[in-house]
Amino acid sequence: MKKYIAILGFGVVGSGCAEVLAQSKKLISDRLGFEIEPKYILDLRDFPDSPYADRIVHDYDIILSDPEVELVAEMMGGSHPALEFSLAAMKAKKSVVTSNKEVVATHGLELLECARENGVKYMFEASVGGGIPIIHTIDTSLVQNDITEIDGILNGTTNYILTRMNSAGVAFDDALSEAREKGYAEADPSADIDGIDACRKIAILAALAFGKLIEPEKIHTEGIRNLDSTDVKNAASAGYAIKLIGRTFSDNGRICAYVCPMLVPASDPLCTVNDVFNGIKVNGDAVGEVMLYGRGAGKMPTASAVVADIVNILSGSGVDYSWERAKDSDILGFEAVSSRHYIRVTGECGCLSGFEKIADGAYITSEMSEADAALLEKRLEESGVRVEARLRVLG
Amino acid sequence: MKKYIAILGFGVVGSGCAEVLAQSKKLISDRLGFEIEPKYILDLRDFPDSPYADRIVHDYDIILSDPEVELVAEMMGGSHPALEFSLAAMKAKKSVVTSNKEVVATHGLELLECARENGVKYMFEASVGGGIPIIHTIDTSLVQNDITEIDGILNGTTNYILTRMNSAGVAFDDALSEAREKGYAEADPSADIDGIDACRKIAILAALAFGKLIEPEKIHTEGIRNLDSTDVKNAASAGYAIKLIGRTFSDNGRICAYVCPMLVPASDPLCTVNDVFNGIKVNGDAVGEVMLYGRGAGKMPTASAVVADIVNILSGSGVDYSWERAKDSDILGFEAVSSRHYIRVTGECGCLSGFEKIADGAYITSEMSEADAALLEKRLEESGVRVEARLRVLG
């Protein structure tokens, strides 16, 4: 028996999805008792040399009106028309899977509600962590856990850059050029290096863990564009690696989520997640600390995750999510977050003498809130000391 | 609505299972639409002070004959009577979940066949990696991958001992005493330190990945009892940590599985899996390298995995496994395994001059088969050089 799907977007991930389906045809049919076949591939372009050339269509209505198509795999990226196409598919009683974190983080509530109303599934394993099955793990294996915190290295491009800065002492600009040469960074790398990509992913993880979706623009987000190699070196000398961390936790019923570069101690398993790899650490009340590690991006790993969702849905194991919109009163603001801070200054001030000095002019403070750290910065500036850098310490 | 289960064995994991079910009652009923209630707990002892005192029974027939009990969670350990009790439950049309690696690795085929014949499920997430959802991940998220290799740190006790030897230069005997004091090692630690526990777990993982169960006694198994701190120190000086590794891979349709202490390079994510944590690295053709990390033992993590299986089965997402017995012709013997070797000798011999010298008398060879390494050892002994240690290098 065959079950038919349609692929929207025949770019890197879309063509990877077709390849994974072809490669795993026997595995899937042995396991599930049916084959999964892409009947149509929607793209603006033609692909005359592709083995799928005869399945390329340019008119979405062909897909929507074909009752044989049970599921649509959206790998177009961006919010529009991904949102509209996904809604239309679900209204036509077709389940949707996606690798598109932007549309999930921004329009997740509307998409999930549409799925519920139409009795179909909307799943998005590939939107976070590429091939790492983090979403499925939270949904199923950790469902009996009260999740208290998730910390993740969620963006491969920035992790590659930080690994080069850390291990080879390369400056940010040079590391970014290397990442571009290797194809790890796009021509316009802003979404990666400014933390926007990680912000969308932590929004999705927070919604999974706590049932409430925080709008990405309400998530405090710092990237690594202004990170100085001096700070990377200072951190390393004290046993820390600087990583771009997406973090979410719940505190007395309120949810906090933010993205910023953090000093990660060597004892933390995230510290050795290097290069383009991602690592996502989940804390559950029963299971304790669990970390998943793997390729956070790339054609085949991401396609593998898309196909996992397709298989789950077509075999009847799809998941129904019911998220709410996080109200302002549900959110714990970044200014209330408490952590130790790394501070590097030029000049001297007695108010730093109580803190651990890890290098010339570089200190690690005791735990304090963002508000207090801002006050400390102000006091330093007032006494003529220039604050060159301030970063948070994880854990 | 309530669904009823029975717990067999009210020891550490069994009582943890009751606790996780109680703690997660609301999470589970919100998610699944029903509550899961342990109706009976079978144990030889009474527990007059337990909140579950009134559910303790000593006669298994009470459980078998109660049609309300849909599922039996076996946490007794050992092969007998766990095997007989599990078979009886399935013949009474009750699904079974277990944390018992011995019974799965030794009698898995019979148990799975019984499940199939009776139209019920037999699941065992907690038998490998404690709270780490490795089995579910291989089953579901990686199902569309052709798995090529699994390498794991599968035993927390030995990993604690090795971490102490590596980070603090403690000798094996002292590290074992520390592990005992902390409750990480049992009075008789043979199953852990001789690799028997890891052997059972790699047998289960190999069966999941390749569909064929190798009898544990056919798996080459070395423990860490004779590991010398000199070798741990030498390895560290060259950037390796020695870990007890369970490894399985397929090679031209044949399956290889073994357990031995190995030198793990710093670039491998398994290298920094320390203390009682476990790490399991899976290579799939599409997803690439994925690693799962977490607490490989302990009351609540293991109980969390047991409950995950219970939830999966009662919500209709249980998995049917169909393993075959691995014939001798399916198995690639250990003597054919090729790797680099760490060799430490007393004396000098020209036949070592081509190899990398990493410390006084300590070398890392080029890649060679076990058979060739044994020949090299023989040649060394014949030329009056004593081989003090030989270990394999991972990767």
Image: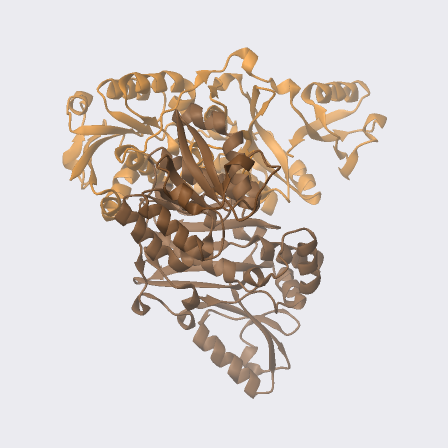
Chain colours: A orange, B brown
Above or below, A378 against A290 in this view is above
Above or below, B348 against A118 in this view is below
Above or below, B358 against A267 in this view is below
Nearer to me, A191 or B125: B125
Query: Which residue appears farthest toward the top when viewing the image?
Result: A328
Q: Position of residue A202 (x, y in %)?
A: 50, 27
Above or below, A354 against A333 in this view is below
User: In the figure, residue A383 lies in which quadrant?
Assistant: top right
Nearer to me, A320 or B103: B103
Residue A292 visible to the viewer: no
Q: Position of residue B91 (x, y in %)?
A: 31, 48
Q: Is residue A383 left or right of residue B369?
A: right
Nearer to me, B273 or B48: B48
* Residue depicted at 39% across the width and 64% down the height: B215
Number of numbered tags placed on the structure image: 0
Q: Position of residue A133 (x, y in %)?
A: 41, 38
* Residue depicted at 48% across the width and 47% down the height: B75
Q: Is residue A249 left or right of residue A104?
A: right
